[in-house]
């Protein structure tokens, strides 16, 4: 492949810098013809050698994870959801009942930082509500919910 670049424009004087640039491009294109397909450009390629990894068993949380144990997370327990018009919202008063999309006795969702991680049932602990975890959401189900 011989590449010739014609930079001349009839009616204009030739620019020496443009001519030099055109010559460099032509040389580079000609040099590309000598490269064989499938051969590396940098010369010989050697086999990579890696050290053997040690198999260590962790007994509890790793010391490397200690720095994240104090990070606060937002934990939410969700009974259900509903949609309503602003007009209906403005008419709510003390004693009003809002119907949710869940059945009575159905497990509640446990969300951590707005991501579903578990389900559970309501319990009372020292006169306060709590939740007993009955099911941990599998990683596969968490990925499906992202879509």
Image (cartoon, grey):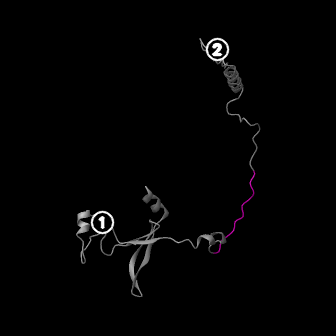
Residue 24, compared with residue 88, is above or below; it is above
Horizontal side of residue 143 vs 31, given as left or right:
left
Residue 28, compared with residue 95, is above or below; it is above
Dot 1: element: loop
Q: Who is closer to the viewer here, 76 or 101?
A: 76
Q: Magenta region: which residues?
A: 49-59
Residue at image mark 1: 82
Residue at image mark 2: 13
Dot 2 alpha-carbon crowd within 10 angstroms: few under 14, some 14 to 19, many 20 or more = few
Q: Is residue 109 magenta?
A: no
Residue 27, compared with residue 133, is above or below; it is above
Residue in the picture at 46% in, 62% down: 142
Residue in the picture at 26% in, 67% down: 89
> Looking at the rendered structure, which numbered label has been put on residue 140?
none
Q: What kind of secondary structure does the magenta stretch mostly adopt?
A: loop
Residue in the picture at 47% in, 59% down: 143
Question: Mark 2 and mark 1: span between their CA atoms?
Answer: 77 Å
- Place residue 1 in its image quadrant: top right
Residue 75, compared with residue 18, is above or below; it is below
Q: Who is closer to the viewer here, 4 or 59?
A: 4
Could you tell me which quadrant the C terminus lies in? Answer: bottom left
Seen from this angle, which residue lies furthest top?
A: 11
Dot 1 alpha-carbon crowd within 10 angstroms: few under 14, some 14 to 19, many 20 or more = few
Residue 35, given in percent of the width and then of the height, sits at: 71, 29
Residue in the picture at 30% in, 71% down: 103
Residue 138, given in percent of the width and then of the height, sits at: 47, 65
């Amino acid at each position: 492949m011989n590449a010739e670049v014609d930079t001349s424009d009839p009616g204009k004087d030739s620019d020496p810098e443009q001519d030099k640039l055109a010559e460099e491009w032509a040389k580079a294109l000609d040099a590309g013809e000598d490269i064989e397909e499938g051969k590396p450009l940098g010369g010989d390629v050697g086999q990579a050698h890696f050290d053997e990894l040690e198999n260590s068993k962790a007994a509890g949380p790793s010391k490397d994870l200690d720095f994240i144990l104090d990070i606060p997370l937002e934990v939410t327990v969700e009974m259900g959801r509903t949609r309503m018009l602003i007009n209906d919202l403005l008419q709510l008063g003390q004693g009003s009942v809002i119907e949710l999309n869940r059945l009575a006795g159905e497990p509640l969702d446990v969300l951590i930082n707005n991501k579903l991680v578990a389900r559970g049932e309501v319990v009372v602990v020292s006169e306060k509500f709590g939740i007993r975890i009955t099911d941990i959401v599998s990683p596969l189900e968490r990925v499906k919910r992202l879509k």
